[in-house]
């Protein structure tokens, strides 16, 4: 007779298998590009109701992926922040970039495609819903380091600062996702060189051309279209 503990262990293994399979397929084809049945078949599950049993819905399965991955990334990031000279407070732009990027790079592995999944979800509405619904105890380090990055760039006008940060976010997800899809992880030297570029982009002087264009936009605002 199968023990209760044995059944629980088998059930947890099935749950993790479904999570990791869904993560891999979503990372390859996007959330909308993968059906529940494709995930079930790829995970080697014959029961047509297995995903409904464990997760209830496809979106809940996506939430489960984040709940599965975020604790390790959060812990890694918190440890990095404590190792900075400021112990997480008043971080420099470079320190903040390292604390954002390194834990994501560390997560890349044969059975972990979280970074490539984030890249696929970057321009979707569902990404915001997933992060909003996530356990706040596993997103605190991300929120703190994002704030530190913003605070390190206070000399920039808000619109310029937010535009540059968005470019960097999009860039590092795309670059790290590329490593994941090639089955490799960036070396320290490679990551340091990438952070050189992202830091330079964030801290570049604002040109006179941009300042003039911003002033012109304020004086002659473009009518909003409806």
Image (cartoon, grey):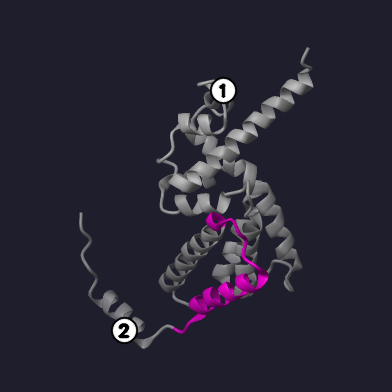
Is mark 1 in CB contact (under 8 Å) with mark 2?
Answer: no
Does 4 appear above or below 124? above
Secondary structure character of the magenta stretch overall: helix
In percent of the image, x 71 and y 53: which residue is there?
Answer: 75
In percent of the image, x 20 and y 64: which residue is there?
Answer: 223
Does 26 appear above or below 61? below
Looking at this view, is 202 or 43 the one in front?
A: 43
In percent of the image, x 64 and y 63: which residue is there?
Answer: 102
Along the horizontal axis of the image, is 34 left or right of 11? left
Tell me the quarter of the picture where residue 185 sits.
bottom right
Task: Give the residue number, with chain letter if any, for mark 2.
Answer: 212
In percent of the image, x 42 and y 83: which residue is there?
Answer: 206
Q: Position of residue 126 (x, y in %)?
A: 44, 44
Instruction: Say whether residue 36 is visible.
Output: yes
- Answer whether residue 201 is magenta in the image: yes
Q: Position of residue 121 (x, y in %)?
A: 46, 50
Position of the N terminus by quadrant: top right
Tell me the quarter of the picture where residue 46 sits.
top right
Task: Give the residue number, with chain letter if any, for mark 1.
Answer: 53
Q: Closer to the N terminus: mark 1 or mark 2?
A: 1
- Answer whether residue 74 is magenta in the image: no
Looking at this view, is 46 or 108 the one in front?
A: 46
Dot 1 falls on a residue whose secondary structure is helix
Q: Position of residue 115 (x, y in %)?
A: 55, 54
Which residues make up the magenta segment? 180-205
Q: Residues within 10 Å of mark 2 (few under 14, many from 20)?
A: few
């Amino acid at each position: 007779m199968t023990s209760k503990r044995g059944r629980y262990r088998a059930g947890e293994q099935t749950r993790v298998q479904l999570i990791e399979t869904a993560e891999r397929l979503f990372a390859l084809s996007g959330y909308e590009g993968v059906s529940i049945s494709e995930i079930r078949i790829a995970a080697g599950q014959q029961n047509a109701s297995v995903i409904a049993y464990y997760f209830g819905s496809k979106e809940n399965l996506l939430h489960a992926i984040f709940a599965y991955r975020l604790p390790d990334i959060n812990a890694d990031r918190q440890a990095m922040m404590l190792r900075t000279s400021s112990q997480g407070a008043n971080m420099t732009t470079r320190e903040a970039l390292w604390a954002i990027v390194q834990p994501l790079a560390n997560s890349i592995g044969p059975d972990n495609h979280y970074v490539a999944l984030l890249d696929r979800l970057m321009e979707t509405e569902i990404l915001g819903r997933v992060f909003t619904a996530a356990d706040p105890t596993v997103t605190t380090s991300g929120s703190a380091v994002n704030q530190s990055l913003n605070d390190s760039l206070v000399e920039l006008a808000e619109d310029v600062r937010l535009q540059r940060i968005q470019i960097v976010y999009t860039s590092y997800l795309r670059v790290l996702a590329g490593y994941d899809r090639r089955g490799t992880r960036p070396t320290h030297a490679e990551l340091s060189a990438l952070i050189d570029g992202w830091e330079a982009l964030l801290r570049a002087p604002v040109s006179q051309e941009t300042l003039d264009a911003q002033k012109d936009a304020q004086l002659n605002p473009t009518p909003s279209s409806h």
